[in-house]
């Protein structure tokens, strides 16, 4: 069974098709994870990074929620997300502290 996942503005991108359990996981954890996904909040140096390579607004948040939910170990790791298709990449300073870099996308 497939499920639709609403985007931030409430619309639905028909190109995003997920199985129902995955869609429900995203819906139930999105609110809790959103504050950790916000790069505008100043924080300590990142330890983990996700570089989003798919040029699709809906996947931007989906990848962030999925990878953070699956790869967190203690919940205290500092995550940072970069929009690779907009040429946003870790700085030299960030690269010094990163222990994990995930390149998302269907490439």
Image (cartoon, rainbow, N blue to C red):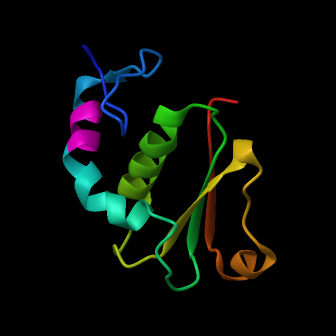
Residue 93, placed above or below residue 79 = below
User: Residue at position x 32%, y 59% from top?
Assistant: 33
User: Residue at position x 35%, y 55% from top?
Assistant: 69
Q: Does the magenta stretch include residue 5?
A: no
Please give the range of residues in magenta: 22-27
Residue 90, placed above or below residue 8 = below
Residue lying at the far bottom of the rendered structure? 44
Residue 65 in picture, x, y percent from top left: 39, 50
Can residue 39 be seen here? The reply is: yes
Say whether residue 32 is left or right of residue 93: left
Residue lying at the far front of the rendered structure? 9
Residue 88, placed above or below residue 53 = below
Residue 67 in picture, x, y percent from top left: 45, 51
Residue 53 in picture, x, y percent from top left: 67, 40
Classify residue 19 by image quadrant: top left
User: Residue at position x 42%, y 57% from top?
Assistant: 68
Can residue 72 be seen here? The reply is: no
Magenta highlight: main SS: helix
């Amino acid at each position: 069974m497939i499920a639709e996942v609403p985007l931030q503005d409430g619309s639905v991108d028909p190109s995003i098709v997920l199985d129902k359990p995955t869609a429900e996981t995203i819906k139930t954890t999105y609110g809790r994870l959103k504050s950790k996904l916000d790069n505008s909040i100043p924080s300590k140096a990142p330890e983990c990074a996700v570089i989003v390579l798919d040029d699709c607004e809906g996947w931007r948040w989906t990848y962030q929620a999925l990878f953070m939910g699956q790869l967190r170990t203690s919940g205290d790791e500092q995550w940072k997300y970069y929009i690779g298709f907009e040429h946003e990449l870790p700085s030299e300073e960030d690269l010094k502290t990163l222990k994990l870099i995930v390149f998302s996308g269907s490439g």
